[in-house]
Image (cartoon, grey):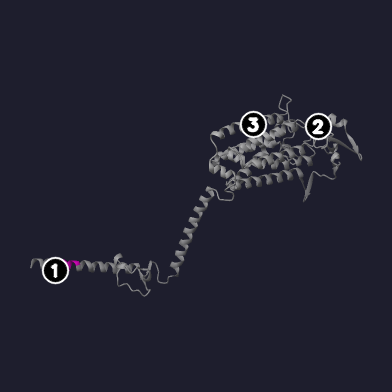
Amino acid sequence: MSYTIRFPHLHIVLNHVGQSINLWGYEVAFYGIIIAIGMILGVSMILREARRSNQSEDSYLDIAIWTIIFSVIGARLYYVAFAWDAYKDDLLSIFNIRQGGLAIYGGVLAGILTAWIISRIKKMNFLQIADTCILGLPIGQLIGRWGNFFNREAFGQYTDNLFAMQIPIDAVRQPESITSEMLSHVQNIDGVSYISVHPTFLYESLWNLGVFLILFLMRKHIKFRGQQFWTYLAAYGAGRFWIEGLRTDQLILFGTGLPVSQLLAAVMVVIGVLAILIGLAYAKKHPLSEREQEEIAGKYAGQKTKQEAKEKSGSNKKSSSKKNAKEDEKEDKKDPSNEGTEALRVDQVSNEGDEEGIPEELPDDGGVLTVDEVIRRTDERIKAEKEGEEILSQNVEKTTKE
């Protein structure tokens, strides 16, 4: 099998473009590696945007992890559902995604549903989550599409335009995607038969780059929650509708002969455009609050969210309380005369002790009196004062009688 891929009109010839790499005797497909890189960079963008808009990065990391898991499952189930004939005789092959077979629409739909469920559980605004996370999606897509390049799949019909891509017939992963028109234009180069096709992976990668730039530039200027999300649906849907029409490996809607992905793309455009128009009209009457506008503009970037500040404050109070308790315990242990009873240093007693019921005759030499001793002396003084008052009262009565 030949591993060469050619772009003749761009004068690019890529030799030895493998499909996998051997690590310790295990074949790891480039498709999977590229998908993983796209996910990592996409999540990084999401966390960056959460930090910029003064939201909890931890919450978005949780959302990203669960969304990725269910998006992969959704992408696989979507592909298998519309290509059932290829899997019905070998059900175990459904779990083998190393060779491709992930449909982005299934991943997007599963991801949206997962994010919505998490927003209900965490009591977060779904549209705010959608606006934040949507920036990471086109990044993952524009990188992930290059997995199709290494797999020699998801290409378009025959073309001889500027971007025409030539791939060896024996390297095509899905031979059924080769059309009669392609075979009628086969070129033999150095004994290898090449078909010339639209590099739809490249078209979609560049389109996603454009979508990302639009979202990135408008992120500080949105007028209503969800504007980024709906813009993505409309923009990506428009590009996908065009690109899907070029592909020869379309998934067909049961019993209709219509490409299901192209239909979904059209629905995305309609929903996205309508939602944007309705949202802008609503924003004129109910604009975002000043605080929301400042967060969107990134004014509080890097500052702790209210939730994080509250948790931090509570943690500090607990830590301070524990620290003070430990310090008091250490002081008690250091005092040699404090054995089982609290001690009171005389130099800590106010000179106005008499007003507080503390005996004036307490020594001021810095000695130590136990609490019991202080109480005993105080009781004696009170008793003496009462006896003195009784004697004084008796003397007054005698004087009065005389």
- Examine the structure image and report whether residue 100 is included in the region drawn in magenta: no
Quarter of the image for residue 174 reads top right
Quarter of the image for residue 236 reads top right
Identify the secondary structure beneath mark 3. helix
Q: Is residue 303 above or below residue 274?
A: below
Which residue in the protein does label 2 denote? 157
Q: Which residues are magenta?
A: 389-394
Q: Is residue 336 above or below residue 116?
A: below
Which residue is situated farthest in the left direction here? Answer: 402
Residue 105 visible in this rendered orientation of the protein: no
Q: Report, in whole angstroms, how far the alpha carbon at label 1 lies from the one at label 2.
A: 126 Å
Which residue in the protein does label 3 denote? 273
The mark closer to the camera, 3 or 1, is 3
Point out the image quarter for the N terminus.
top right
Horizontal and vertical percent position of residue 285: 54, 33
Please give the name of the residue rendered at 52% of the width and 53% of the height, measured from the top-left corner: 312
How packed mark 2 is, by other alpha carbons closer than 10 Å (few <14, some 14-19, many 20 or more), is many
As shown in the figure, which amino acid type bears the numbered disc 2?
A: Gln
Left or right, residue 17 beside residue 72: right
Quarter of the image for residue 280 reads top right
Looking at this view, is 358 or 239 the one in front? Answer: 239
- Examine the structure image and report whether residue 393 is included in the region drawn in magenta: yes
How packed mark 3 is, by other alpha carbons closer than 10 Å (few <14, some 14-19, many 20 or more), is some
- The mark nearer the N terminus, 1 or 2, is 2
Identify the secondary structure beneath mark 1. helix
Q: Report, in whole angstroms, how far the alpha carbon at label 3 lies from the one at label 1.
A: 104 Å
Res 395 label: 1
As shown in the figure, which amino acid type bears the numbered disc 1?
A: Asn
Which residue is situated farthest in the right direction here? Answer: 190
Res 22 label: none
